[in-house]
Amino acid sequence: MTLDEVASKRRSVRHFKDAGLSFDERKSKIEEIISFVSENAPSWKNSQTHRYYVALSDDKIASVTNALVERNRPKCTNAVALIVSCFEKNVSGFSKSEEKLVPDNECGNEWGAYDLGLSDSLLLLKARELGFDTLIMGLRDSAALKSALKIPESQEVMAVISVGMRSDEPVKPGRKTLEDILKIF
Ligand SMILES: Cc1cc2nc3c(=O)[nH]c(=O)nc-3n(C[C@H](O)[C@H](O)[C@H](O)COP(=O)(O)O)c2cc1C
């Protein structure tokens, strides 16, 4: 599959069918996806602050689902995995100066979030290449996720990404025009 095919086939999918995969099969697919991210994602000074916590067991999938806002919960039905994407704070975009941690510019920890977005983008595309669909969910309870998955305070929780197999063809939402988003000088 070309990048064009993978990217254009990727959609936010909110209805999954039963994929019929065992725990071990799902684990192996998730490891393949996250290895791809780890091997290929760029990051500020190669700081690699992305961290992934993956719910595969029924009880962990239930805990992560319950940490979503109510309207997102039904979208996780039949998910093969729920991935909580996080980053280690105060690393990407920071330097040590005289033993003090100093932001390299005005963006501070936004660079950690920026790096994680790049990683997550590769994650979505790799999942698609392997025949899976995804949904990024930003409406979640960070404290509940930290407690359920023992995520340290040094990390920021960003999105929950569901992984599954589409039960029907999703509709592509409209896009802005090139004129809306591009200025060439
Ligand atoms: C940071 C982020 C947060 C999102 N949060 C949610 C969410 O909480 N619930 C949801 O149904 N979709 C969520 N989405 C999915 C967007 O609605 C979707 O990407 C957008 O409508 C474009 O559709 P497409 O992904 O099919 O191209 C989120 C997407 C991003 C990138």
Image (cartoon, rainbow, N blue to C red):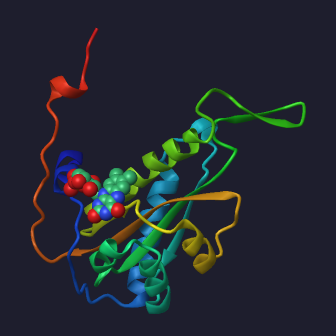
Provide residue 27's location: percent of width, then percent of height: 45, 80
Q: Nearer the viewer, residue 69 or 126?
A: 69
Q: How many marks?
A: 0
**Whether residue 127 can be seen here:** no
State left or right for residue 170 relative to residue 129.
left
State left or right for residue 136 relative to residue 144.
left
Q: Tell me the quadrant of the picture where the C terminus can be found.
A: top left
Residue in view at x 64 percent, y 26 percent? 105
Q: Relative to residue 46, is residue 1 depicted above or below?
A: below
State left or right for residue 107 relative to residue 116.
right
Q: Relative to residue 13, is residue 148 depicted above or below?
A: below
**Whether residue 38 can be seen here:** yes
Residue in view at x 64 percent, y 44 percent? 47
Residue in view at x 64 percent, y 69 percent? 151
Provide residue 69's location: percent of width, then percent of height: 39, 71
Residue in view at x 44 percent, y 58 percent? 36
